[in-house]
Image (spheres, grey):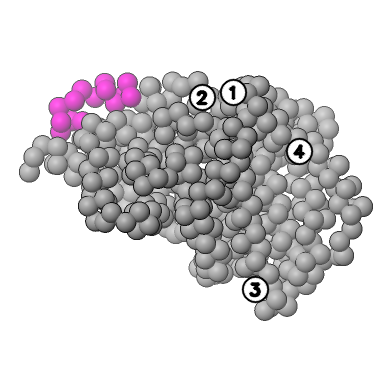
Amino acid sequence: MPVNSAAIVILLVSFLVMVILRFPIAYAVAISTIITFLYMGIPITTVCQQMVKGISSFSLMAVPFFITMGVLMGTGGISEKLIALANACVGWMTGGMAMVNIVASYFFGGISGSAAADTASLGSILIPMMVDQGYDDDFSTAVTITSSCEGLLVPPSHNMVIYAMAAGGVSVGSLFLAGYVPGAILAVTLMVGSYIISKARKYPKGDKFSLRILLKQLVKSFWALAAVIIVVFGVVGGIFTATESAAIAVIYSLLVSVYIYRGLTWKGVWKALDKCVDTLAIVLILISTSCAFGYCLTSLHVPALAANAIIGITDNKIVIALLINLILLFLGCIMDMSPIILIATPILLPIATAIGITPVQFGIIMVLNCGIGLLTPPVGAVLFIGSAVGKVKMERVVKATVPFYLCMIITLLLITFIPEICMALPNWLM
């Protein structure tokens, strides 16, 4: 066996074995890289150099700022106001509370950018409310976890910043704009699925629609929604970079949470920052080790080999696009979101661009695939959080989520084969 082929086998097999043995992903990535470097005779100092290089990026500074913004806004009394706004918008429909859950996730996603934060924050409020109004607990939990993935698509999303870095400098502003319409389509497909199930199970409607109440709740939620306006329009308008906008958003979130909504005290701020540090430690370790892993993949020409292998199966663009989605969905079942983005982007992006998918569109495709992965066992973090928050066995949640998986797959296919869904806003405004 040629040296390079043996090194590739060592790298990938050792990584997969450690994933199956439930090693933390960061450790699995780092150890498999070190083993491969030792086999190839490359100094271990190269691993350290690549890890440091991976996190020595100005644009990457946006990630901790966006995470901090999400934590501050999520714990600062924002959830209740966004739920009230969503209720004023869609609570009058059949299965009204399910619709409120989905729309509230769209609003909250524009603040937190995290499916896990969405599920923990909104789920702890909405799941008990839905159960009290006669909704099944497994259905309520399934709606909560699937709608939380809207937050991955709706800007500002720190995962899009990570993708922009992994893809080699894709415009963060374009990615932010590209997520709005797919996020809305995902919300609509989930609402259609919820409506059908609600009709069949005779779930209740909410109060009649009132424009006065809608305007009242819109005013109350203005300060929360303004954070998104500051970030997105600041970046798109070229007023400041993604990193600068994230820093401004943190200061804004702090002022709104402490002085306007008063959901946080200064003591609570320190607790929130402590939570941010825990999250950031995990994210930055993953980024640094994944960069070393990616350097190893590139040195072994794995991206080119993978591209040739996929194109060797077929030259049909539709089939290749479906294969890319299947690969990402499979990775989502066994890995967390950040390492998938960091490891798979250098491999799959050249294949995607070769069949006419732009880097911005591919970013949205990847994020949604990873979002679906967060809901699938055995590593579905959001699935576990939803099960814990809703106090429902995971097996029941998975069964109740099956119709919503179908809704998400429909959305995924739409954004894969209709580029205008992702690209209309970036092309128009950028």
Cα distance between the residues tagged 3 and 4: 32 Å
**Residues at marks 1 and 2 touching, judged by CB atoms closer than 8 Å:** yes
Q: Amino acid at mark 2?
A: Ser
Quadrant including the C terminus: top right
Disc 2: which residue: 59
Q: Amino acid at mark 4?
A: Ala
Q: Residues within 10 Å of mark 1 (few under 14, many from 20)?
A: some
Looking at marks 3 and 4 on the same chain, the residue that comes earlier in the sequence is marked by 3
Q: Residues within 10 Å of mark 4 (few under 14, many from 20)?
A: many
Looking at marks 1 and 4 on the same chain, the residue that comes earlier in the sequence is marked by 4
Disc 3: which residue: 197
What's the mark number on residue 224?
Answer: 4
- Across and down, in percent, residue 97 comes to 74, 63
What's the mark number on residue 241?
Answer: 1
Cα distance between the residues tagged 3 and 1: 44 Å
Residue for point 46% across, 36% down: 163
- Across and down, in percent, residue 389 comes to 62, 56
Left or right of residue 372: residue 334: left
